[in-house]
Amino acid sequence: MFKRALLIVLLGTFLFSCAPKRNADVCYTIAPAMVDSIPQLQITMRLKADPSGTTSLSFPNEAWGETDLYHTLGEMQLLNVEGVVEKDTDSSRIILVYPKDTKELEFQYYLKQDIEGDISTRNVYRPVINNTYFHVFSHNMFMLPEHSEDHISIGMDWSEFPETYTIHNSFGSGERKQLLKDMDKEKFGSAIFVGGDFRVLEGEINGNKISLATRGDWVPFKEEDVFKVLEQTLTYQRNFWDDHSQTYFTVTMQPFPQEMGSSFQGTGLTNSFATTVSNNDMTDIEQMVYLFNHELMHNWIGHTITTANEEEQYWFSEGFTEYYTFKNIAKNHINGLGSDFFINEINRTIRDLYGSPVMTAPNAEINYDNFWTNPDYSKLPYWRGALFAFYLDQTLQKNSKGKQSLDDVMHQIYADATKGQKVDHAYFIQVMEPFWKGDFEAFFQKHIVDGVPLDLYGLFDELGWEYSPMNDIYQLGFEFTEDRKAIKNVVEGSAAWEAGLKVGDSVFSRSIWQGSIDHQVELGVLRNGEKMEFAYYPVTKAEVPQIKPTPTNGAELGF
């Protein structure tokens, strides 16, 4: 009798909480819970019952590189009817079975953290739920009716959290009750939800709300400075595209501990961008400047401007995004960075490309398998595409005496994209030909399709820029075994060879700044039972042009 009365009370509370959302197709009440001394989220959902007596809810067991996400689910039960709840991990469904005359379902489930130890970029896509805060992506938080329309109205009730508990997500900040009308299910499934001790910094751009939600005590920078970078980035990017249509946008920034080096990751989501950043003195705000400018540029290049074949056009979607990251930062002096920053980034990109073992690989080799399994191919379209964009931009400006630039091409591509045009090779050639002197199709075929390096020496001579023809490029000088626990081979004559590394050395410690010629490689190895330490700069001389950061070159760039 007591259990039945308790159920009626809980059910009544749920219906009262959702009462303002009666026009929602699906309504969620989210509440904090403690189960067996483990902090969890209790999620109670109300939805229309399928008349067949079976309703399937989508909930991925594998997503965004994570597996076994069902481990994060706790107790599940139907509240208003007798029934059965089944997990179907193979099809990523939660199946509810109930009497066929049921009109509405009230279903409750618990979500918990299954991460042990500290949060890192390796496990951030799993739910983080503790006594202090939660950080969860929507695909791993909210179950959705599988057979509903693509657009539905969604209600969310957060009123059971304490008043001092921050509620913040991709759809609003500080709102205890939210109604998302005619919501695209796919966009709802690509969102971030945080709560707890997050602090929210807010501002406006042309009347549109922007915010930064972060937590913890930051070591490398002040969050107010990060928010300023965000504000500058969004302002100048939106001005460039003449697009101030987004009424709400937020960035979440979660810190994590890391002893050596720095690392960060960012994920572009609906109305939002979620970041996880190492909180130590090896991280700096310039990394945030790059991260924000690259990833937020994807709101246009990648979101509005789409490609016909993803891997085939990575030279554009990633390479041109990379170039406009450098250009947007330098042109607008974001965080005080200008022409020297631009020159340094172009020089680094040149060094990275010239040091790549797949520098001359044809574009066809940048396929799904290579891109996602081989780091050399993963970076190739970034470098090749960025330098291709740089070459086009400088050539167009020179030939038109400053009246035209690659910006004009991008604005044309954006205008066409709003009418449904996708970028592929034929379309890009078509757009470029009116701007280009000569046979652009042959030029494109040579340098993008066939992968022949651009004549940067010729470009710099033509522009009259000062540059050095021979320079250091990155060369690690050795290769790890597959398990990365030993030295597989050493390049004869390399800095690693000169330092004394040998094939077969077992590695017990390492500090490697991949791609950096300014940081020493530090290795601790075990050889014949003896511990040895090595340190060297991973460089080699090569014919690689580098622009000199002179006032004259800076003036020519116009930054």
Image (spheres, grey):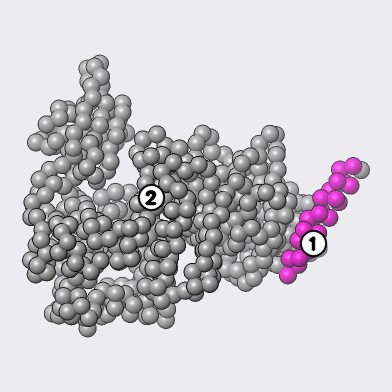
Residue beneath disc 2: 285
Residue 327's x, y, as percent? 29, 65
Q: Is residue 476 left or right of residue 45?
A: left
In the image, farthest residue toward the right: 1
Q: Is residue 318 left or right of residue 31?
A: left
Magenta stretch, overall SS: helix
| Residue 129 vs residue 439, the one in the foreground | 129
Q: Quadrant of the C terminus?
A: bottom left
| Residue 490 shows up from this direction | no
Tag 2, which secondary structure? helix
Q: Residue at x 10, y 45 (%)?
A: 541
Q: Quadrant of the N terminus?
A: top right
- The image shows residue 56, relative to residue 402, as above or below, that is above
Residue 216's x, y, as percent? 52, 43
| Residue 347 shows up from this direction | yes
In the image, farthest residue toward the bottom: 434
The tag on residue 61 is: none
Quadrant of the image occupied by residue 334: bottom left
Residues packed near mark 1 inside 10 Å, few (<14), some (14 to 19) or many (20 plus): some
Q: Residue at x 26, y 57 (%)?
A: 341
| Residue 262 vs residue 299, the one in the foreground | 262
Q: Which residues are magenta?
A: 2-23
Q: Amino acid at mark 1?
A: Thr
The tag on residue 102 is: 1
Is 53 magenta? The answer is no
Is 18 magenta? The answer is yes
Q: Amino acid at mark 2?
A: Ile
Tag 1, which secondary structure? loop
Cβ–Cβ under 8 Å for marks 2 and 1: no
Residues packed near mark 2 inside 10 Å, few (<14), some (14 to 19) or many (20 plus): some
Q: Nearer the viewer, mark 2 or mark 1?
A: 2
Quadrant of the image occupied by residue 294: bottom left
